[in-house]
Image (spheres, coloured by chain):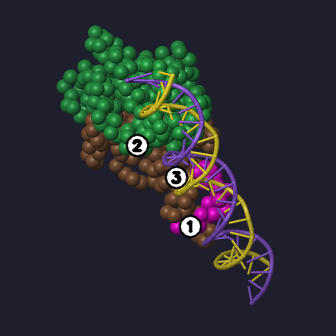
Chain colours: A green, B brown, C yellow, D purple
Amino acid sequence: MTRPSEVTRDRIMKAAERLFAERGYDGTSIRAIVSRARVNQAAINYHFEGKDGLYREVLRAAFRGLTEDQLAHAGEASGMSPEEALAAFIRRQLRPLLARDEASRHIRIFNWESVRPTPVFRKLLSEEAAPFMGFTTELVRRFLPDADQRTLTVAAIWLLGQCGIFVRNREQLAGPPAELSLEESAVDWLAQTISRWAVSGLGQAG
Amino acid sequence: MTRPSEVTRDRIMKAAERLFAERGYDGTSIRAIVSRARVNQAAINYHFEGKDGLYREVLRAAFRGLTEDQLAHAGEASGMSPEEALAAFIRRQLRPLLARDEASRHIRIFNWESVRPTPVFRKLLSEEAAPFMGFTTELVRRFLPDADQRTLTVAAIWLLGQCGIFVRNREQLAGPPAELSLEESAVDWLAQTISRWAVSGLGQAG
DNA sequence: TCAAAATTCAAACGGTGGTTTGAATTTGGA
DNA sequence: TCCAAATTCAAACCACCGTTTGAATTTTGA
């Protein structure tokens, strides 16, 4: 479908995704979106029934994109050793450090939500986060075969936290006082270092 | 000093700190602040030269409070074993999970900043984060005596990430699909678990 | 081809935001 | 005590926000 109305809708979605990722919901105005998308201001209300509706659609698309990105590698993981699978997962989580691509924008949108979740996001999370959390939980279960469910859940979150802090604070970490380099080789080294610590952390504790 | 103008200033600061922590900069209006502080609307411009100026002051106070809180325990840390010191640090970082106190609000304000740092915050961070980062770095250095500076920095950030994700997502983690309990005993268990993983993670890797 | 439906458009609406104003009041030092 | 400075106050100002309106235009299907 490339019906004219679809291209308008699509341009709005793309512009909105970029702006919501960069400035958050409150910081993004309808006028900024339509200016960037080069469509009429009323088009948002016509196609999405208002700013809330547009945001909901962006959120859903971002969520779908992110989980599919990780779940697409779920199959490969089962053919790897636990250590390899974990390292690959961590490397993938750190990708936004290098790329300014779609997945990075999606992660940024979720960062906004993690500070003060909108009702739309809460609903989405409780309904659709299960597959992603399940995948991450399976990843750590291979290191903690005897752990109970709570421990596995905490381990999965713990793992995400280790990666997330670098992604979230990318800009600050490049400057003082940390002065971290974010070139490709540096990110590779970072991924390996985190993997090593995470593996031995989970590996040793019962 | 309890000069009348000082109490006005103080009431504004206290109300602003609460609201900024809860709703962020954009989500907090001048009218909401003065209503909570029970002062006149123009008082903010008189005492702080506008909303920006007020925010800067809140940020500075929060930063001062947090670093002092951690540095106050720096002395105790040197009398502990590396494992004990790390566990105490992690326990302190997880405190906002339980308490709704001042330190918790300060951490929340910084969470807002981590998504889209204001210029004010960037400046503050590059100028005054050194002591705090230094303290955290010393904490991990005892596990990595031979590591270079970059590794130590990454280890410190890595450690903060493990705690931060639980604090930042407190509300979501209590609901589905994670369903984590956030009672005192559960938080104690969480702190111990994270400590164990972090200790063995850092302990094993050279 | 043509009429009905879908879509785009410029303009305006009501509401809220931060800031300014200028007078009224309170404070503090001579 | 008294006056100048500091502080408080209600009201208004102007800019921006999301949304609505109703007409103009384009698309669609028969």
Q: How far is disc 2 from disc 3 in space, using C-alphas? A: 16 Å
Is residue B44 covered in magenta? yes
Quarter of the N terminus of chain A within the rendering: top left
Q: Residues within 10 Å of mark 2 (few under 14, many from 20)?
A: some
Label for residue B28? 3
Classify mark 3: residues with Cα within 10 Å, few (<14), some (14-19) or many (20+): some
- Residue A58 sits in quarter: top left
Q: Residue at x 38, y 38 (%)?
A: A121
At label 1, the amino acid type is: Val
Residue matched to label 2: A118
Whether residue A17 sits left or right of residue D11 in the image: it is left
* Distance Cα–Cα, label 1 vs label 3: 16 Å
Q: Position of residue B182 (x, y in %)?
A: 29, 45
Residue found at x 20% / y 31%: A148
Which picture quadrant has residue B87?
top left
Per the model, the C-alpha gap separating discs 2 and 1 is 30 Å
- Nearer the camera: disc 2 or disc 3: 2
Quickly name the residue at label 1.
B39
Q: Secondary structure at mark 1?
A: loop
